[in-house]
Amino acid sequence: MSAIKKSKLLSLKHFPKRGLVGSFSSCCKPSVFGHVEQGPADPIFGVAEAFKADKNPKKVMLGVGAYRSDDGKPYVLPCVRKAEEIVYKKCGNHEYLPIAGMPEFNKVAVELALGKDSCILKEGLNMTVQSLSGTGAIRLGAAFLGMFYKGNKEAYISNPTWGNHRNVFLHSGIPWKYYTYYDPKTIGLDFKGMSENLCCIPDESIVVFHAVSHNPTGVDPTPEQWKAFSQICMQKKHFPFFDMAYQGFASGDPERDAKAVRMFIDDGHQVAVAQSFAKNMGLYGERIGAFTFTCRSKEEVAKVLSQMKIVIRAMYSNPPTFGARLITEILGNPELKCLWLQDVKCLADRIMSCRQKLVEALKKEGSKKDWSHITNQIGMFSFTGLKPEEVKKIIKEFAVYMTADGRISIASLGSPNIDYVAKAMHAVTK
């Protein structure tokens, strides 16, 4: 007789005669998950859910950071359409990518970030891997630092910052704290406060910077201010961690938008750079990004890459293919790259135009407030200066949706809604 026949396995006759349907749900054993509390809604996607449920025909969504055409429709860049045709014609297979991602993609991605003439790239001192967009890039960096960073294992993030920074570092085992960034009185950068904070925090801390187009404020340091922060970080031996989600999308010039990162490297810092191609390529759903550490030797690069592969293997094994193929075609083909530069300049110019039109519409409505901060800011988002109670009012009375801190996505404005949004903003602030 086999071992299976000899064993005393439970059969259906051992279960209560209530039938299988519903028998487990009514079992006396307490649920494993009964203690789990309801989690708070994501501040961005929670706004989107409320917007979808609103029946007001005039409703406007200004909360989610995705580019829209002037008529409010999702927009696919012409360079992406051309790249799609090329990729389809090549009829590539669907085999797994290497753990670190597509080598050709990693090459063009880091060249875009650091510049083709970067000494780091010429000497092979970069550890670059493909990631699951910008969020995934930050997660990889945070996970690696949580395991191997020997300095003060705390992440200092700007106040305010992109809401997910807190989650990513915390879930990577790295506690976070704020440093001063935004001055609500001037609706601008608190340079003095930020400088003092960077000087006062423990030596060798991880400092998270928005490389360009600060989210949510749209307020960026000047080149001179960046230089001062670089010097402070060098004196304090801080580790700069750059979140670069908007290269090219902010000013329309990828070289200009990468100045802060390149300045820190030129000043002698080792840095982390998390790249996203969601905004500047319009590839939101493809989840395509890259993560880079700069190192001191090729031997160090090899060791860091070996450990990063272990992190990736345990986290998601290896990245997806399609987005990497598109980016490689666009940045690796001179004709397509030229078209992309034109495309991204058009995106940035339209956003700048929307800023100006919104301010003009507010003045036309009769607003006496100074809205110049909207045109002084850069990138997709604007900190309008609306207070929480004003945000609640504009949502309730006008169905104009934004985050509770008054941040709006300028990219969601267009001819059909700018005047209405200006009317609503004036009504709740006069």
Image: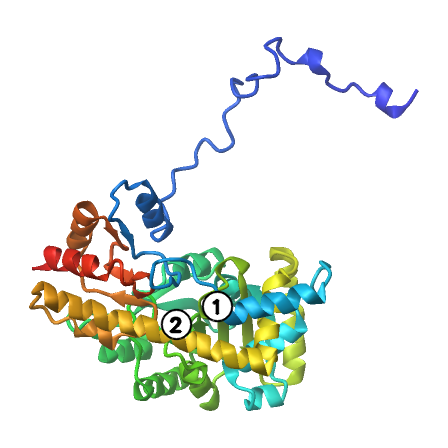
Residue 380 makes an appearance in the image: yes
Q: Note whether 292 is above or below 399 in the view shown.
A: below
Q: Which residue is mark 2?
A: 347
**Image check: 52 left or right of 129?**
left
Q: Quadrant of the N terminus?
A: top right
Which mark, by number, is residue 77?
Answer: 1
**What distance separates the C-alpha of mark 1 from that of mark 2?**
9 Å
Per the image, label 1 sits on a secondary structure element best described as: loop
**Image check: 256 left or right of 352?**
right
- Among numbered discs 1 and 2, the one appearing first in the sequence: 1
- Give the percent coordinates (x, y) of residue 2: 90, 23
Residue at the image point whose x is 50% and y is 75% from the top: 272
Bin the neighbour count of mark 2 within 10 Å (Cα to Cα): few under 14, some 14-19, many 20 and up: many
Q: Nearer the viewer, residue 272 or 414?
A: 414
Q: Residue furthest right?
A: 1
Q: Quadrant of residue 17?
A: top right
Q: Are marks 1 and 2 in contact (CB under 8 Å)?
A: yes
Amino acid under disc 1: Leu
Which mark, by number, is residue 339?
Answer: none
Residue at the image point whose x is 22% and y is 70% from the top: 357
Bin the neighbour count of mark 1 within 10 Å (Cα to Cα): few under 14, some 14-19, many 20 and up: some
Q: Quadrant of residue 69?
A: bottom left
- Give the percent coordinates (x, y) of residue 136: 52, 62
